[in-house]
């Protein structure tokens, strides 16, 4: 690109005495590490795609991810788009820090590294909220007891061993019969955690008789599903967790770089290339999120 | 601020622009691409039950292409790979071409498993469960 204009055409890159890639050893190795990491993430995501393609039903992301802090359901893509923009913006502040480093502007590097670290922490906070929301959620699932071949309704969260988002049950009489078979504590848990405008108090529900509880459940719990593919939880928590761990280590690396900048180490060295290498890692984290966003939330 | 400072191992310095215009332009491009992706995502959410499966698949493929475009901008501008010498660009990007075959082969395989699963499926389906579950 622009480089071709300044490098003479007859440079003998491989004759020794200079880096054949016109880059420092550390930067080239960072690129190779990121390439190998891209294969790791790629393998995870392709494995997820293979299993997803092999299932006859898969959870709809617009149902799984439809809540945000203060919004109980009905708002798909809202929270994850906030997370996406946080990460894009922290990528911009990172590249601005690299830019300031090229011009040996210590104050500028410090300012933008601070903003990048804050962006990373905000993203991690969002992910913590989302995991907590899914792991403590309460979803009505129609479960078969194979011993008696009877159906009852249980309250399931999304974990690595339970997926509450299989095909939905439409038959109202079947739902009613299954509620009659269900344990009272399951019905109470479902009613107290109900999304929407109606809220039930656990103490008041405990005072009700079982027929009254069943009546309330039939009237208020409209979304009952069968168990979904178990693989969903393992892939979701595994891949977003592995990505989140990259974000966490990126934040730690950025804090170390910020401290080294403040101590003047890069001024003594005469260049800010460490910021560039840390930046490569941070942009890679953003790059992976673009694909995680695609595979888990958009399609 | 004319001289760009880099590692002494670098022979020729790429002419990094003085301003930050290119960075912000890329930020707006990435934001616009994300907004279009979200718009298509909402289209699938609102119309997903009433449009044909082929239109759903087409929309998802378009979202995938927009994602690859975002990846290109991040790698080329933010990670400055576009400013490196050709040798370095090739040694990073050529191995990644393997992904083209990985994606085709593995998704094909997954689809084949699904078809075998459907062929061998037991006659009882989820819808037929409604005949059981009497109230005890």
Image: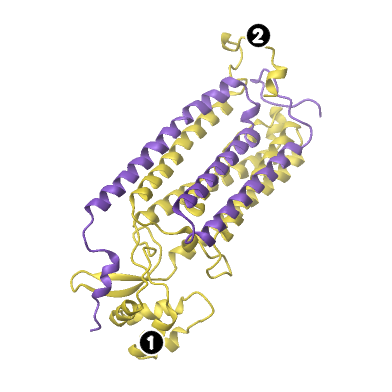
Chain colours: A yellow, B purple
Which labelled disc corresponds to residue A10? 2
Does label 2 or label 1 sit earlier along the sequence? 2
Give the crowd class for mark 2: few <14, some 14-19, many >=20 residues within 10 Å.
Answer: few
Q: Is residue B13 left or right of residue B64?
A: right
Above or below: residue A197 compared with residue B44: below
Label 1 resides on the chain identified as: A
- Select label 2 or label 1 by which is in front: 1
Q: Residue at x 52, y 28 (%)?
A: B93
**Could you say where residue B129 lies in the image, as x and y percent from the top left?**
26, 70
Quadrant hosting residue A59: bottom left
**Could you say where residue A197 lies in the image, as x and y percent from the top left?**
54, 79
As drawn, the residue found furthest toward the left would be A147
| Circles 2 and 1: CB atoms closer than 8 Å | no
The front one of A188 and A5 is A5
Above or below: residue A192 compared with residue A93: below
What element does badge 1 sit on? helix
Which labelled disc corresponds to residue A215? 1
Quadrant of the image for the N terminus of chain A?
top right
Give the crowd class for mark 1: few <14, some 14-19, many >=20 residues within 10 Å.
Answer: few
Q: Is residue A137 left or right of residue A227?
A: right
Q: Residue at x 71, y 27 (%)?
A: A270
Q: Is residue A21 visible?
A: yes
Q: Is residue B43 left or right of residue B121?
A: right
Label 2 resides on the chain identified as: A
**Could you say where residue B108 lies in the image, as x and y percent from the top left?**
36, 41
Q: Residue at x 51, y 61 (%)?
A: A130
Q: Are marks 2 and 1 on the same chain?
A: yes
User: Alpha-carbon distance for marks 2 and 1?
Assistant: 85 Å
Q: Is residue A83 visible?
A: no
**Could you say where residue A164 lies in the image, as x and y percent from the top left?**
38, 65
As drawn, the residue found furthest toward the right would be B1
What element does badge 2 sit on? loop
């Amino acid at each position: 690109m622009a480089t071709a204009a300044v490098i003479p055409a007859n440079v003998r890159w491989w004759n020794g005495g200079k880096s054949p890639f016109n880059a420092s050893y550390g930067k080239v190795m960072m690129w190779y590490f990121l390439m190998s990491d891209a294969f790791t993430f790629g393998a995870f995501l392709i494995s997820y795609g293979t299993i997803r393609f092999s299932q006859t039903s898969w959870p709809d992301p617009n149902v799984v991810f439809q809540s945000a802090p203060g919004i109980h359901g009905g708002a798909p893509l809202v929270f994850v788009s906030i997370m996406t923009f946080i990460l894009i913006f922290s990528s911009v502040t990172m590249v601005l820090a690299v830019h300031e480093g090229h011009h040996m502007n210590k104050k500028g590097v410090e300012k933008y590294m601070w903003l990048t670290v804050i962006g990373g922490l905000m993203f991690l906070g969002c992910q913590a909220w989302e995991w907590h929301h899914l792991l403590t959620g309460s979803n009505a699932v129609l479960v078969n007891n194979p011993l008696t071949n009877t159906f009852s309704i249980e309250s399931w969260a999304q974990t690595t061993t339970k997926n509450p988002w299989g095909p939905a049950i439409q038959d109202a009489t079947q739902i009613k019969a299954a509620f009659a078979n269900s344990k009272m504590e399951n019905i109470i848990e479902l009613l107290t955690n109900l999304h929407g405008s109606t809220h039930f108090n656990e103490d008041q529900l405990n005072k009700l008789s079982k027929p009254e509880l069943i009546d309330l459940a039939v009237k208020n719990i409209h979304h009952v599903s069968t168990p979904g593919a178990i693989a969903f939880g393992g892939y979701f928590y595994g891949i977003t967790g592995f990505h989140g761990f990259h974000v966490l280590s990126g934040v730690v690396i950025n804090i170390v770089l910020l401290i080294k900048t403040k101590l003047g180490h890069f001024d003594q060295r005469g260049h800010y290339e460490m910021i560039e290498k840390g930046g490569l890692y941070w942009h890679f984290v953003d790059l992976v999120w673009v694909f995680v966003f695609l595979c888990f939330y958009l399609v | 601020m004319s001289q760009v400072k880099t590692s002494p191992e670098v022979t020729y310095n790429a002419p990094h622009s003085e301003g930050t215009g290119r960075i912000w332009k890329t930020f707006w491009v990435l934001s616009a691409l994300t907004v279009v992706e979200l718009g298509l995502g909402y289209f699938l959410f609102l119309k997903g039950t009433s449009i044909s499966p082929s239109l759903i698949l087409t929309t998802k493929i378009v979202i995938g292409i927009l994602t690859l475009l975002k990846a290109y901008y991040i790698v080329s501008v933010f990670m400055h790979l576009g400013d490196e010498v050709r040798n370095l660009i090739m040694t990073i990007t050529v191995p990644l071409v393997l992904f083209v075959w990985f994606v085709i082969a593995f998704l094909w395989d997954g689809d084949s498993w699904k078809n075998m699963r459907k062929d061998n499926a037991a006659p009882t389906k989820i819808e037929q469960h409604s005949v059981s579950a009497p109230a005890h």
